[in-house]
Amino acid sequence: MKSKLVVLAGPSGVGKGTVVRELVRQKPEVFLSVSATTRKPRPEENHDDHYMFLTEKEFLDEIDEGNLLEHAQFAGAWYGTPRKPVEERIRNNQIVVLEIDLQGARQVKKSMPEAFLVMLKPPSIEELKRRLIDRGTEKPEELELRLQVAIGELEAENEFDAVVINEDVQSAVSQLITLLHLN
Ligand code: 5GP
């Protein structure tokens, strides 16, 4: 893998957040981009740590000013990657990981074709549903929407450079470490 920019996509609830955080814990040289979003924070989430939580107006201003590398609407909220920190880290030869949805992954591939795209897949749709229910952060109708989007996202597997099945966090992280030549 020559690219310094890694995109980790995959359906909501598959465990992307847990996997990337464990990756950064084991390999602190990896820079994890903090996204901006208009979604409301979950109880355990802090500003600037998990996301930059913005109002819709603030988010749209960021788009207008060209400050986002990519952006997308997902389940009724805006999400986007702040451009500056990513470009700075790449210039410094650091490995940058974006944990984003499929629409964002496609935009990054278009604007930065050298990006390395990894899809994190659940062992099965049933398991994904179970993980989303266990997370308990969505209302039933929101959960159903996320599941439908997830099924569509999984069909895009062949657009990715690599696929990792998230059977458990440690094995997913060690597969990523190998794929990214971090060992
Ligand atoms: P959640 O609300 O569960 O934190 O995130 C919902 C979806 O948005 C997930 O698939 C997550 O990967 C994606 N996401 C998070 N940040 C970004 C971003 O900056 N850009 C895009 N396109 N998607 C994002």
Image (cartoon, helix red, strand yellow):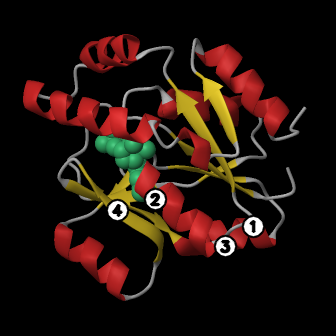
Density class for disc 3 (Cα within 10 Å; few <14, some 14-19, many ≥20) is some
Type of the residue with mark 2 = Gly
Which residue position is annotated with label 1?
Answer: 90
Q: Under 8 Å from ligand 1: the CB of mark 2?
A: yes
Residue at horizontal 73%, vertical 46%?
A: 30
Secondary structure of residue under mark 2: helix
User: Pointers 1 and 3 in contact (CB under 8 A)?
Assistant: yes
Q: Which residue is mark 2?
A: 104
Q: Are marks 2 and 4 in contact (CB under 8 Å)?
A: yes
Which label belongs to residue 67? none
Residue 3 occupies quadrant: bottom right
Q: CA distance from mark 1 to mark 4?
A: 22 Å
Q: Would residue 85 be found to the left or right of residue 107 on screen? A: right
Q: Amino acid at mark 3?
A: Glu
The residue carrying mark 4 is: 72
**Inter-mark Cα distance, 3 to 2:** 16 Å
Residue 156, placed above or below residue 82: above
Q: Is mark 4 within 8 Å of ligand 1?
A: yes
Give percent across and percent down for residue 128. Answer: 37, 18
Name the amino acid, label 1.
Ile
